[in-house]
Image (cartoon, helix red, strand yellow):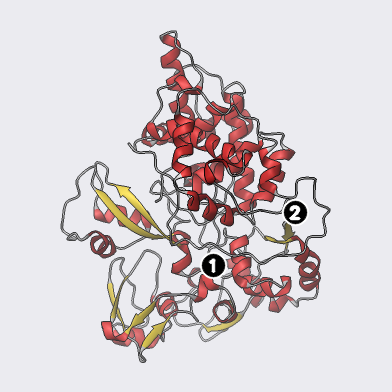
Amino acid sequence: MTRRTLLPVPLLCACGLFLAGCASLGGPSRSTALADANAQQDAAAGTDSGTPIPDVDNTAPVIQWQDLTITTVPTHDDNLWDYLGKHFSLPATGGDGRVQGELNWFAGHGEYLQRVATRARPYLYYIVQQIEARKMPLDVALLPVVESAFDPFAYSNARAAGLWQFIPGTGRHYDLKQDWWYDGRRDVAASTRAALDYLQYLHEMFDGDWLLALAAYNSGGGTVSRAIAYNQRRGLPTDFWHLNLPAQTRAYVPRLLAICELVATPGHLGVDLPAIPNTPYLAQVDVGGQIDLATAARLAGISSEQMYLLNPGYNRWATDPEGPYTLLVPLDREAAFKQGLAGLPPHDRVQWGTHRVRSGETLGELAQRYHTTLKVLRELNGIHGSTIYLNQRLLVPVARATLADNALKAAARVAKLRQADGPHVHHVRSGESLWSIARRFGVDVRQLAEWNHISLHSVLRVGQRLVIRSRGPHLTTASFRTGPGPDETRRTIHYTVREGDSLSSISSRFRVTVDDIAGWNDIDTSDYLQPGQQLTLHVDVTAQSTSS
């Protein structure tokens, strides 16, 4: 089950709370713009009537991480869960039974926390380190259990992404870059930094009350502030337990407290968690420029699958040509990785192909087509301006075959189109070209044009139908994909239709086709949607980063 968690940026609320941190987060004009956006986000928060548990799809991978020898001397608590359980500091209950209700749910679903604990293994120690450095309650380290079930590819119907579930606008406000190459909301290090910044801001906003800060992280600072103001006017208590908050938020804080109680009392209600060594696991390495992730994995001596899942912020086969250039690797691989980087020739960092310039093509167009930048193409080809010539051969970036051939399951387990099912029909999406579609499906661009009776230079329309045929029993995209495969990065979300929604607007919002939505929900493309109607969507998380 997926859930919706909104992370609006706080604003000056009706209750008159002064946001002391506004100046440090940006100037007055920026704060005003954020306040306008926050009003809409607060209005959307908490509209779900239920209190869903985030499981982020049962199909989400649970990686069995290889045991790595760590040379760091362990602390007196060898199991990280034991260490956390002895250092939680948030009050455990408000006396109204909500924490017990969450405990009862977990007691009946012990396998859920087992699955989540396995996902948490590579990330949890790093998060604990960051929280301790800021002297924040260690209870916060388990917030990703509530937010995302520790699935780095978690994605919600509010377009919240990553372990900490940032929506696009709040992510950008906290300097989480989002583009075709990279989404900082899924970057473990960057999103953890942003989440802790945001929580500390909320903590200050609510005068040092961590339960109110956590509630605001879920439903928005405005929502919590208005609830406080309502109680103040009536002479009622203004602590979390007495506020009239959305149902989802009323369950959100008790759920975190219940998880902390289970960790602090091993075996309680029959719930036991798989041990996580209380030792450093990750090191952050600046690779100094764009690099193919499969090459980086080889240098670090780990599988490409592990490299990608330790660095889930990267949407494609390589790091962003304009940065960031940091990668997380297992600590005991750091030295070998740095040594390998130092000895790697510059031309081996990324695989390059050649492109022969055709009539009418521009350098900017080619940069967009090959998903790189003008700067990269200029430097690579010794071009000082933007002038290129007919038949000129240019070096351009392409994905290494090893991305699919080696152990990167996130790219190798791609969908296969069965010839028995007939030709595949692809609906052109925004930004696609004949070349990019041919590459995606592993067919020759000239053949694709011939199948559809169009020229190689045809301008495609969004929604245009293209027929894609195969020559053999299966057409596989494994050798041509430029990033993670759909099996690992597709998430199922349940979207509630709002006033003014249409199939077209929803398809644009989540980067899926109208025909896909109709097929998944057994409706006709000409049907009118009704507010409150429930739709099931299967969303490719890595295609969402450039959404507005």
Q: Amino acid at mark 1?
A: Arg
Front-most of residues 442 and 229: 229
What residue appears at the point 59 percent right and 45 percent down from the top-left corner?
A: 175
What residue appears at the point 17 percent right and 60 percent down from the top-left corner?
A: 524
Q: Is residue 361 visible?
A: yes
- In this view, 81 is above or below 339: above
Q: Please identify the residue farthest to the top as the structure is shown.
A: 235
Q: Please identify the residue farthest to the bottom as the structure is shown.
A: 472
- The tag on residue 21 is none
Secondary element type, mark 1 = loop
Q: Callout 1: few (<14), some (14-19), or many (20+) C-alpha neighbours within 10 Å?
A: many
Q: Which residue is mark 2?
A: 280
Numbered label tally: 2
Secondary element type, mark 2 = loop
Indicate the position of residue 81 as horizontal and vertical percent values. Answer: 66, 46
Which of the 4 image quadrants contains residue 513?
A: bottom left
- In this view, 387 is above or below 322: below
Indicate the position of residue 523 as horizontal and vertical percent values. Answer: 19, 59
Q: Is residue 108 left or right of residue 120?
A: left
Q: Amino acid at mark 2?
A: Pro
Q: Which residue is mark 1?
A: 316
